[in-house]
Image (cartoon, rainbow, N blue to C red):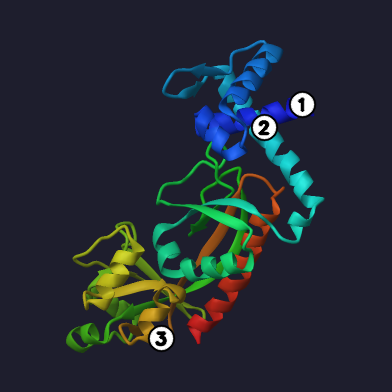
Amino acid sequence: MELLNDMALFVEVAHARSFRGAADVTGVPNSTLSRRISALEKAIGLRLLHRTTRKVELTEAGQLYYERSRRIVDEARIAHEQLSEMLAQPSGVLRASLPVDFATIYMAPLVADFARRYPGISFDFDLTPRRVDLVSEPFDVAIRMGDLSDSNLIARLLARLSVQAYASPSYLKVSGTPEHPSQLSRHECLGFPKAATWELHRSGETVKVDVGGRFLVNSVGMFRRLATLDMGIVLLPAEIVADDVAAGRLQKVLPDWEGKPTPVYALTETRLLPAKVQRFIEFLQERLSQRGDEARD
């Protein structure tokens, strides 16, 4: 048990790259942490940390030990959690990587509801477009939209979001309302640089149309906003534009046609999840399904 405790302390020091940072997390004094890690190094027979007056760096052996130890410590912690009341009332810090626009536009109210339901959980969110490494970075879960590339991560499907075309009433008044997907090629269409072809479906019928426009943007929030400012037509999940539709800033274009549904996944490194992560994923599955039905009504 002492070895496991020292291993857990080492994981905190390695994660914080600082004895002081680890002390703040664990409540163990700096001097005690230093002594315990030194004893651990002596027992192993290898130096795990390079210590300087300003920071702590992992040695090659320390990096390997950290990667292995973190999993062991996490699984030990989960084992204790699953045998305690924490399973019924989860607690701790939930570290999640979220897609920037989807999180700020759509997920924020869901997260607020989840936080009210589980007051024992605190949150550390990283909103970034980059693909985080769940193995080497300290995230419990990553939420991602769109098709996934091959990986060794565990992917749980949260929802498939219905996708349709939208534009502002003013844009349609000036530019006309397309009555068939083929007519989109004559319109300003807003989207990602790689989305030069839109594919729309209706009752077994599929139409692919090459689209273009003056704006190529790598942000859903940006081209959604441009659409409300009369700059063109967007192809987006109903959930993303629900507030704009309700306020009359956007309306459906080609309402009988739908784009390819956008999947939303929760990615984790392992299937063995602490209660806080399991509850978060279950909550998102439930609420994304409910709000998806509301957005399409």
Q: Reply above or below: 277 against 75.
A: below
Identify the residue position indicated by label 2 in the image.
8
Identify the residue at image location x=64%, y=58%. Answer: 120
Q: Type of residue at label 1?
A: Glu
- Count of labels in the image: 3
Identify the residue position indicated by label 1 in the image.
2
Q: Reply above or below: 266 against 202.
A: above
Q: Type of residue at label 3?
A: Pro
Question: In the figure, is residue 151 to the left or right of 247?
Answer: right
Q: Distance between the residues labelled 2 and 3?
A: 56 Å
Q: How far apart are marks 1 and 3 (CA)?
A: 64 Å
Q: Type of residue at label 2?
A: Ala
What's the mark number on residue 200?
Answer: none
| Mark 1 / mark 2, whichever is N-terminal | 1
Q: Nearer the viewer, mark 1 or mark 3?
A: 1
| Mark 2 / mark 3, whichever is N-terminal | 2
| Mark 1 / mark 3, whichever is N-terminal | 1
Residue 210 seen by the camera: no
Where is residue 77? Give x, y as percent. 72, 42
Label 2: how many residues lie within 10 Å, few (<14), some (14-19) or many (20+)? Answer: many
Q: What element carries label 1?
A: helix
